[in-house]
Amino acid sequence: MSGRFEVIVVGAGLAGACAAALLARRAQLPAASIALLAPELPAAVAHGAAPELRVAAISRASERILRAADAWERLDHSRLCAYERMRVWHESAAPDGEAALSFDAADIGEPNLGFIAEMSALQRACLDSFREAGGQIMQSTLERLSIGEHCAWLECAGGLSAEARVVVGADGAQSAVREGAALAARVRDYRQLAIVATIATSRPHAHTAWQRFLATGPLAFLPLFDGSCSIVWSIDEALAGMLRDCGERQFEAALDEASASALGRTRLASERASFPLRSLAAQSYVAPRCALIGDAAHVIHPLAGQGANLGLLDAAALCEAIAAAPGLREDPGALRVLRRYEQQRRTHNLAMDAAMSVFQSGFAAARGPAAWLVNGALAAVNRSPAVKRGFARQALGIAGELPRLARA
């Protein structure tokens, strides 16, 4: 089996699924000339099922991109949870003290700062949009990528082969597309694991995202649609294995201590899962006939929950670059076309990676006088409405240069 396409997206994660839907609907290319290659697709969730472990904090900019992909309206909105406030504090301060940074969507006249959504639901909504637009899905695994002057060839498992004028690598941190295109990447190990689980709390989450910075790594509570919370507990490897594998009561006691009981007593409401934390940055996002998006191009620390949003911004910017090519009488796979995408996104993503690394190392290392300085700085921010509005705009994802599809 073989096929010829304008664009093949490799990977059905959120960035890849959204890129495929955007390209089929917004790139002014025949939808049937867009293909998505992935070994498996997300399964449907049963009605009334408990929240899934993998969730994402979707910013306003990302919401707009998903609307442009005709995916937002396909979500079950009863399983979304809007978060209206954020509260961030250092372990040396009280969660309700003046040194706990708190900002509210109301500070900038918005109804919320974004939504906590299940990752598989977002993927399915994008894939459904892609299918309905006329895009083609190929379920297989990329085995070899060859890039020529006029097209790229993909050899896949099961005897499937295809060619395209543009290949989009959206196949994660271990990207086969990145390797096939000989695009190098810098990887830095944080020597931490992120433990994720669903937690019931004795106090309501109040539609607030909570985060405490600890010496061993940050702990976040994200509000969910059923009143529970999703935790992302980034913790040094030496302790993470024990916390992931210990008994439920021992884990809950450790979580109560780590969260300073900001939401009261906690109760484990799901299994625990973990994944290693690393920073990854491709030295270049593009090669002739090839572009990387999402985790194939960059991976950052999850402490601000921005990974999914960066991938969606990549998808939007790449779609716009490819869509502009015909009007400029250019080949969509030409390096000069794809570099317009890279120039828009790489600097922004590198800055976000650097900021997350500074927050992670700076807050974790703060002790004694340093902790006093951190708490004093957070208290000063709390007293500045203008600065707090800036934080709220960053949380919404509406600050700085954005792709057109991410703007109002």
Image (tube, helix red, strand yellow):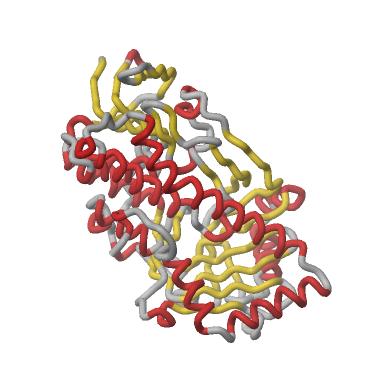
Asked if residue 222 can be seen in this view, the reply is yes
Q: Is residue 164 left or right of residue 393?
A: left
Q: Quadrant of the C terminus?
A: bottom left
Image quadrant of residue 68? bottom left
What is the quadrant of residue 265 in the picture? bottom right
Looking at this view, name the residue that lies furthest to the front. Answer: 328
Residue name at image x 41 percent, y 23 percent: 142
Nearest the viewer among 248 and 16 is 16
Q: Position of residue 253 (x, y in %)?
A: 69, 67
Question: Relative to 138, does residue 191 appear above or below in the rendering?
Answer: below
In the depicted structure, whether residue 93 falls above or below residue 27: below
Give the quadrant of the N terminus: top left
45 is higher (above) or lower (below) than 210: above
Q: Is residue 272 visible?
A: no
Residue nearest the observer in this picture, 371 or 231 = 371
- Kindly identify the residue that appears in the image at 62 percent across and 58 percent down: 233
Q: Which residue is at 25% across, 37% downward?
A: 325
What residue is at 54 percent from the left and 72 percent from the top?
Answer: 201
Q: x%, y% of residue 268?
A: 57, 62
Decide which of 158, 375 is in the foreground and name it. 375
Of residue 214 and residue 183, the one placed in the foreground of this image is: 183
Location of residue 353 in the rendering, given as x and y in whole percent from the top left corner: 58, 51
Query: Residue 151, position in %: x, y?
Result: 31, 20
Relative to 41, say whether 153 is above or below.
above
